[in-house]
Image (tube, helix red, strand yellow):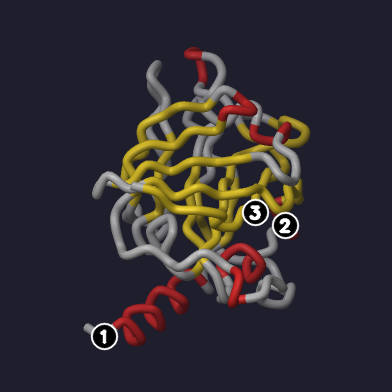
């Protein structure tokens, strides 16, 4: 399968997805049916000054010093109902990378999900995600031994009904990262909103 045909298939699949919050005693970032009508995200950065995109390599570890995150990253696929899987509700909570998105550092938006709470186990790995601010750093260690360094460009809290599907999954002209969890008021066994961190690749190292 060519890169172009694979990208087209992934884009078509993502067009039918919307982030919502999962139950099951915790609060994840399950991807279900879509909503968002905003325009696709486009970078305003000068491509000549942007870091070169990395080759494909699955993420192994995620570090966000500003909010004390240092977690393994597990792969996430699709559940039987067509929604994206979320990390399991466990005492040793970790983040999960959606395998149909680019790997961190590849061209396009790479998507990593995490819980804000994990039921009786307490806080989730992304419990302080909404505290990140523009300019904060994020490091993703890849399976090939390289590290992709990202810089936060914006943090948004949005109602699930208004989830910005295209801004999160739309084409961009540089490697970017999306971190997603739940947030806002809690209702029943979930939350009303999603917290979304947008970040862009700043450097890559061995």
Rendered residue at 33%/54% (across/down): 77
Question: Of helix, strand and loop, which one carries label 3?
Answer: strand
Residue labelled with disc 1: 2
In front: label 3 or label 2: 3
| Total marks in image | 3
Rendered residue at 66%/67% (across/down): 167
Chain-order first, disc 3 or disc 2 = 2
Rendered residue at 50%/37% (across/down): 114
Q: Give the x, y percent position of residue 111.
A: 49, 54
- Tell me which corner region of the image, top left, top right, bottom left or bottom right, holds residue 117: top right
Q: Residues within 10 Å of mark 1 (few under 14, many from 20)?
A: few
- Tell me which corner region of the image, top left, top right, bottom left or bottom right, holds residue 54: bottom left
In space, the residues marked 3 and 2 are separated at their CA atoms by 19 Å
Rendered residue at 75%/50% (across/down): 159
Residue 161 circle label: 2
The reply, left or right, for residue 144 in relation to residue 34 is: left
Residue 184 circle label: none
Q: Residues within 10 Å of mark 3 (few under 14, many from 20)?
A: many
Q: In the picture shown, does residue 106 fall above or below 184?
A: below
Q: Give the x, y percent position of residue 147.
A: 39, 46
Chain-order first, disc 1 or disc 3 = 1
In space, the residues marked 1 and 3 are separated at their CA atoms by 28 Å
Q: Residues within 10 Å of mark 2 (few under 14, many from 20)?
A: some
- Report if the CB atoms under discs 3 and 2 are less than 8 Å apart: no
Question: Of helix, strand and loop, which one carries label 2?
Answer: helix
Question: Of helix, strand and loop, which one carries label 1?
Answer: loop
Residue labelled with disc 3: 198
Q: In the picture shown, does residue 71 fall above or below 192?
A: above
């Amino acid at each position: 399968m060519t890169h172009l045909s694979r990208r087209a298939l992934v884009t078509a699949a993502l067009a039918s997805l919307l982030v919502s919050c999962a139950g099951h005693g915790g609060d994840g970032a399950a991807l279900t049916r879509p909503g968002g009508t905003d325009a696709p995200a486009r970078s305003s950065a000068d491509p000549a000054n942007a870091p070169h995109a990395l080759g494909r390599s699955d993420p192994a570890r995620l570090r966000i010093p500003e909010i004390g995150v240092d977690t393994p990253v597990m792969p996430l696929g699709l559940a039987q109902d067509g929604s994206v899987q979320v990390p399991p509700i466990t005492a040793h909570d970790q983040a999960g990378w959606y395998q149909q998105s680019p790997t961190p550092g590849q061209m396009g938006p790479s998507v990593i999900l995490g819980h804000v709470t994990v039921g009786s186990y307490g806080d989730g790995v992304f419990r302080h995600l909404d505290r990140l601010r523009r300019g904060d750093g994020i490091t993703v260690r890849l399976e090939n031994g390289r590290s992709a360094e990202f810089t936060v460009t914006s943090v948004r809290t949005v109602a699930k009904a208004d989830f910005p599907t295209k801004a999160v999954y739309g084409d961009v002209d540089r490697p970017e990262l999306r971190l997603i969890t739940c947030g806002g008021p809690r209702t029943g066994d979930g939350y009303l909103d999603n917290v979304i961190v947008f970040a862009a690749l700043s450097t890559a190292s061995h």
